[in-house]
Image (cartoon, rainbow, N blue to C red):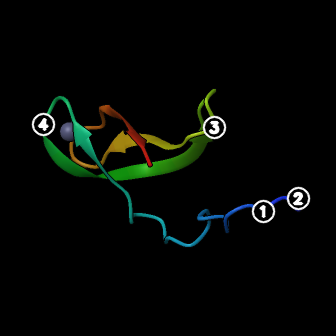
Amino acid sequence: MAAAPPPAAEMGARPVGAYEGYCMKCRATRAVANPQLTELANGRKAVKGTCSVCGTGIFKIL
Ligand SMILES: [Zn+2]
């Protein structure tokens, strides 16, 4: 049984500023400033950044 090829990486396809996340302080969806792609222990991709309005940290699982 040949192993299926891994799915195409989805990283690097989006320009900076393309991410949005829910800001707990604004209680609204905001653009994520300084987005940094990270990977969770379970292999899920996530974006860590800050709210472009108030600067509160935003963490969004992709
Ligand atoms: Zn905010």
What x and y, as percent, mark residue 41?
63, 26
Task: Give the residue pinned by disc 4.
Answer: 26
Q: Which element carries disc 4, helix, strand or loop?
A: loop
Task: Give the residue pinned by disc 3.
Answer: 43
Foreground label between 1 and 4 = 1
The structure residue drawn at horizontal position 59% and vertical position 65%, both measured from the top left corner, is 10
Label 1, ligand 1: CB separation under 8 Å: no
Foreground label between 4 and 3 = 3
Q: Amino acid at mark 2?
A: Met
Nearer-N-terminus badge (4/3): 4
Label 4, ligand 1: CB separation under 8 Å: yes
Give the spatial CA distance, label 1 vs label 2. Answer: 9 Å
Foreground label between 4 and 2 = 2
* Badge 3: residue crowd in 10 Å (few <14, some 14–19, many ≥20): few
Task: Give the residue pinned by disc 1.
Answer: 4
Q: Which element carries disc 2, helix, strand or loop?
A: loop
The structure residue drawn at horizontal position 38% and vertical position 58%, both measured from the top left corner, is 19
Residue extending farthest front: 1
Q: Amino acid at mark 3?
A: Gly
Give the spatial CA distance, label 3 vs label 1. Answer: 18 Å
* Badge 4: residue crowd in 10 Å (few <14, some 14–19, many ≥20): few
In the rendering, which numbered label is found on residue 1?
Answer: 2
Give the spatial CA distance, label 3 vs label 2. Answer: 24 Å
In the rendering, which numbered label is found on residue 32?
Answer: none
For the residue pair 41 and 29, the one nearer the viewer reads as: 41
